[in-house]
Structures are given as structure tokens and as C-alpha cells.
Image: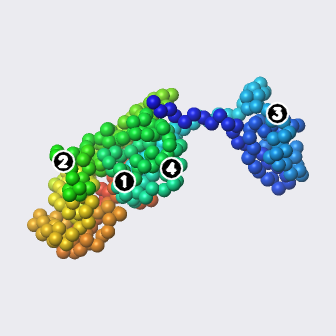
Amino acid sequence: MAERIQPDSRSVPVYAVCGEQGYERAVDAGDFFFGCAWRASFLRRLVRINHKGHEVTRRNFGASCRISGLAIAFIAAALGSAIPAQAKKLTVVTATTDMAALAQVVGGEKISVEAIAKGYQDPHFVEAKPSFLLKLRQADLLITVGLQLEIGWLPPLITQSGNPRIQVGANGYLDASQFAEILEIPAGTVTRAMGDVHPLGNPHYWLDPENGRRLAKGIAGKLGELDSADAAYFQQRFQDFDKQLTTAEQKWDAEMKPYRGRKVVTYHNSLPNFVKHFGLNVIGYVEPRPGIPPTPSHTIELIGLMKRENCKIILVEPYFDLKTPNSIAAQTGGKVVQYLPSVGGEKDVTDYFKLFDYDIDLLIKAFQATQ
């Protein structure tokens, strides 16, 4: 079983101020200064006074009076001025901003969290960067969407990170799909001729508030496993989120109720959980098959279908080209709606609640404009 990163045993850097100009440089806590006051709380002030007007190099500091970190701790404790310790936060890395938002809401101040993919990016296709490896090397926990959403870019990064804690199957690797209701699981054999069909089910499951609740609960549980001392804190944060989400769901459901049953077209098959929750009806897709660019013949068929079904709304993710959707809208009297599939797709959409607020507001305005 993988273990969390242990606290660094090396001496902790502190800053000393030297010379008339107030020059600062990092020194080891093990570099003690001969002739200075012993109390650590006065270290910065007394170093400035003791060496005023003298340029002090790191070599001189080390040569003056080096004693072990253990001895420093003993002396500081004896004099009642121990250096304050700060508890280490769990370092969480997520594949997407949505998982980061949910991890943050239950992790609070006990974790630091960062997403690899940006909210405006297609999570199927993320350009791997060396900086991602650094993030993964430092992670105590990696949270993925799973269902092969990140299969094109994340697995090599996990392997190359060399971090045993987050390898697939390790305790610090969390496939969040295990907590969610998964739709559209293929019954038969999946082939490339079918397009970009995910054999384990549709991975865009976070766009359902009920799944958001399940995900937050599962993440809180995992954080509690990795940091048992704060397990109760994580559970309380989940309970608070659950209450807030229940209130938000009531508002969203009331706002969308007049439009239940409305027909829409989407560019990619990204919204099965969203449309199921809010009672919308997807009648077609701009893509002829998942991941396959629009073709003239399919576009003509889709235009005919929209006219017959009196469908006026085309939902498009921000990373797809609008040329074909705009052409379809022009020929059907419809409206293209660029919704956000993820937190951070716009700078003001900073959390899970604001994501639904943003998309539902867009949809309602589009429905009203195409009555």
C-alpha cells in the first residue's frame, strides 16, 4: 500500500537579514550564529544587528557554529520558544477542474488541489507538459474521471512521474467513476468504426447534481483514508456541501421545470446525465459518430430532422468549431448555445454550483428566445 509523502527531514530554510541594505538570503535552520541571541523568535532582528555593516556569506555562516537540528529544537524548547510547526496538507492532483472543485469543497484547508486539464479544454485531448510530471510527483492523491476519458494523455504521465503513491491500483489513485451513475454502457463489442465510444460507459457523468453528491462523498471518504486525523473534518464538509447542493437542486429543478421535454441537439454526446436529470430530449448530434467530424451528408440529415421535430437548440462545447452548428442554426431557425462542460470554462465559473447556474441560465434564455 502506498504511503503519503513524509515530512522532509532536512533542515528547514529560514531567512536572515544582513548588511546595511537589508539583504536577505535563505540559510538552514542548522546554521546557528555565534554570538547571536538563542531565541529563534528574535533571530531575524538580532542577525541584522550583530552583522550590521558586514557582508556575511553562506560559507561563513556554516563555519561559525553548526549544530544539529535536534540540538536547536532542544534549546528552543528549553527556553520556551519552539519554532511553530505547520501540519502538512494533502497534495491532491485531479485530471479535470470539476474533480478539483469537488475535492476542494470537501477538503477545505486541509488539502492543496490542482487540476491538470483546464476548464476550457477538451478533456479527451490534453497536451502533456513536463510541468504535469512535477505536479504528479508531489501528489498524495490523484483523482481521475475514469472510463477512459483521459486514456490518450494521462497514463504515460502517471508512469513517468515515478510516484508510487498514485500508480493505478495504489491507495493514492482514485477513479471517481466508481461513485457515479454511469449511462450508455455498450452492450456488445465496441469497434473503432463506431467512433469514440467509451466501452465502460459515457464519462461525462459529473454534469448531474446527483452524481456531484456521490462524487463529493466518495472523495471525502478517500481523503479520510489518507488523513485519518482529519476524517471527521472531511465528513462535516461533505455534509455541509450536501445541504447546499440540496437547496441548489431545488432551485435548478424549479427553473428548468417549464422546459422539461424540450428537444435539443448537441455537438458531442457529452450530456446524457445532464439531460436525464433535467428532463430534456436529445434528438441528434452534430457529429455523425462520437469523435468523428461533421460530414455534409450527416449535416443535411440533421437539418431535416430538426425541422421535422421543431428542434431549435444546438448545444456546443467551447472547444468545437462553430462553422457547422451556425450553418445548421441558420437553416433551421435555431440557436447555437455554447455551454460550459466544466468548472473554469469562464473565469467567473469558479465552483460546481456556478457551473450549473451558468449553464441553466444560458439554456433558459435560449428556450425563451426560440419559443
Label disc, if present, on residue 189 of the rendered structure: 2
Residue sitting nearer the eye, 199 or 326: 199
Which residue does the numbered mark 1 point to in the structure image?
A: 152
Residue 181 placement (x, y as % from top left): 26, 41
C-alpha distance separating marks 2 and 3: 73 Å
Position of 338 compared to 130: left or right?
left
Q: Amino acid at mark 1?
A: Gly
Which residue does the numbered mark 3 point to in the structure image?
A: 38
Which residue does the numbered mark 4 point to in the structure image?
A: 133
Of helix, strand and loop, which one carries label 4? helix
Residue sitting nearer the eye, 244 or 288: 288
Q: Nearer the viewer, mark 2 or mark 4?
A: 2
Q: Amino acid at mark 3?
A: Trp
Residue 240 placement (x, y as % from top left): 40, 37
The residue drawn where x is 76% and y is 28% is 71
C-alpha distance separating marks 2 and 1: 20 Å
**Mark 2 Cα-neighbour bin, 10 Å: few <14, some 14–19, many ≥20:** few
Of the image marks 4 and 3, the number of the one nearer the N terminus: 3
The residue drawn where x is 39% and y is 36% is 169
**Mark 3 Cα-neighbour bin, 10 Å: few <14, some 14–19, many ≥20:** some
C-alpha distance separating marks 4 and 1: 16 Å
